[in-house]
Image (cartoon, grey):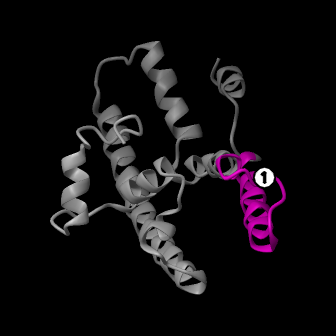
């Protein structure tokens, strides 16, 4: 677990979890299960459609987290650019380039372009070479979104030429 980024995770931690004296986050459950060559649902014996319901609940939870994070990110961008607008002295060239990159490449929508990479990595970790019906639909939906978004995303070279 420590190798998976859960610092301080010891045998005592597992004993407290097993005795019900410590809750487990979903991420910890997944990493614990993976370390033991199981799925999180397999550890607690969740079969078939019950596992689907559990996974669906996780999708709901994470979509709320993602929406909240997008809002927080947008607020952070807002604070960032308002601060940049309030600077009275000239901004150094490297800082100006950073500002332009933030606007062109790091909006909340553009950050979702990483979804395709994350999905490919998940499929690779799960050793899925031939996706099923629903996974194919997910892959296609993410590819459509990436195509639509990436068509509007300038490269760094385009930014340099445009602002050069």
Q: Nearer the viewer, residue 111 or 121?
A: 121
| Relative height, residue 142 to residue 101 (above, below) | below
Q: Is residue 54 left or right of residue 5?
A: right
Residue 102 is inside the magenta segment:
no
Q: Position of residue 75 (x, y in %)?
A: 34, 52
* Outermost residue toward the left in this view: 21
Q: Position of residue 35 (x, y in %)?
A: 47, 47
Circle 1 sits in a helix, a strand or a loop, which is it? helix
In the image, what residue occupies the spot 32% across and 61% down?
Answer: 25
Per the rendered image, the range of residues in magenta is: 123-150
Residue 128 locus on image (x, y percent) = 75, 55
Q: Is residue 95 left or right of residue 131?
A: left
Residue 139, position in %: x, y?
76, 60
Residue, disc 1: 147
- 90, above or below 41, in the image: above
Q: Quadrant of the C terminus?
A: top right
């Amino acid at each position: 677990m420590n190798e998976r980024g859960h610092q301080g995770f010891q045998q005592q931690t597992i004993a407290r979890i097993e005795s019900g004296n410590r809750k487990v986050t979903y991420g910890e459950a997944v990493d614990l299960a993976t370390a033991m060559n199981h799925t999180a649902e397999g550890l607690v014996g969740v079969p078939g459609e019950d596992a689907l319901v559990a996974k669906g609940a996780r999708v709901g939870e994470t979509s709320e987290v993602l929406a909240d994070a997008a809002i927080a990110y947008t607020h952070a961008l807002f604070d960032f650019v308002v601060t940049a607008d309030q600077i009275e002295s000239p901004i150094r060239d490297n800082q100006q380039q950073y500002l332009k990159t933030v606007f062109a490449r790091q909006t909340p929508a553009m950050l979702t372009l990483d979804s395709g990479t994350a999905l490919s990595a998940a499929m690779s970790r799960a050793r899925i070479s031939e996706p099923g019906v629903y996974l194919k639909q997910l892959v296609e939906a993410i590819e459509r979104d990436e195509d639509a978004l990436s068509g509007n995303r300038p490269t760094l070279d385009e930014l340099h030429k445009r602002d050069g």
